[in-house]
Amino acid sequence: MSIVKINVLEVPAEQREVLEKRFASRAGAVESSDGFEWFELLRPVEGTDSYLVYTRWRDEESFQSWMEGPMKAAHRGGATEGERPKPAATGSTVWSFEVVQQTGPKEA
């Protein structure tokens, strides 16, 4: 079954709009990657400053291939090291999961 990677980003309130705009500007960067299945950027509603970046992959190898290629390029944004904007997040943790059960809506 698939694997899920959740990047937990600590984002101060004043940086939320910056983070969301950066993700919006990279729309399409992951969708064509081999093994990619799903992406969601989850905004906190209450009780935390943590955004969750949810991605789902066919397998660990697909995720690692994306990490070593397209993800690095997306995070560089074509800029040299001196031109990189300050990160919007103040911290980051990656959680990894294997999908062991799944379900969806019943067909009508």
Image (cartoon, rainbow, N blue to C red):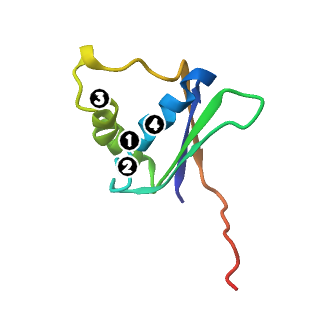
Q: Are marks 4 and 1 in contact (CB under 8 Å)?
A: yes
C-alpha separation, residue under disc 1 versus residue under disc 2: 12 Å
Whether residue 65 sits left or right of residue 44 in the image: it is left
Which quarter of the figure has residue 108?
A: bottom right
Q: Of the residues shown, which amino acid type is indicated by label 3?
A: Arg
Which numbered dot is residue 30?
Answer: 2
Q: Are marks 3 and 2 in contact (CB under 8 Å)?
A: no
Please tell me which of labels 4 and 2 falls first in the chain: 4
Please tell me which of labels 3 and 4 falls first in the chain: 4
Q: Which residue is mark 3?
A: 76
Within 10 Å of disc 3 (Cα), the crowding (few <14, some 14-19, many 20+) is some
Q: Are marks 1 and 3 in contact (CB under 8 Å)?
A: no
Residue at image position (58%, 24%) is 11
Please tell me which of labels 3 and 2 falls first in the chain: 2
Please tell me which of labels 1 and 2 falls first in the chain: 1
Residue at image position (63%, 24%) is 13
Measured as percent of width and height from the top left, residue 32 is found at 33, 56
Which residue is most to the top?
82
Which residue is most to the bottom?
108
Q: Are marks 1 and 2 in contact (CB under 8 Å)?
A: no
Residue in front for this viewpoint, 83 or 59:
83
Vertical side of 47 occupied by 54: above or below: below
Q: Name the element at disc 2.
A: loop
Q: Which residue is mark 4?
A: 21
Q: Are marks 3 and 4 in contact (CB under 8 Å)?
A: no
C-alpha separation, residue under disc 4 versus residue under disc 2: 16 Å
Q: Which residue is mark 1?
A: 25
* Comparing labels 3 and 4, the label whose residue is closer to the camera: 4
C-alpha separation, residue under disc 4 versus residue under disc 1: 6 Å
Which quarter of the figure has residue 99?
A: bottom right
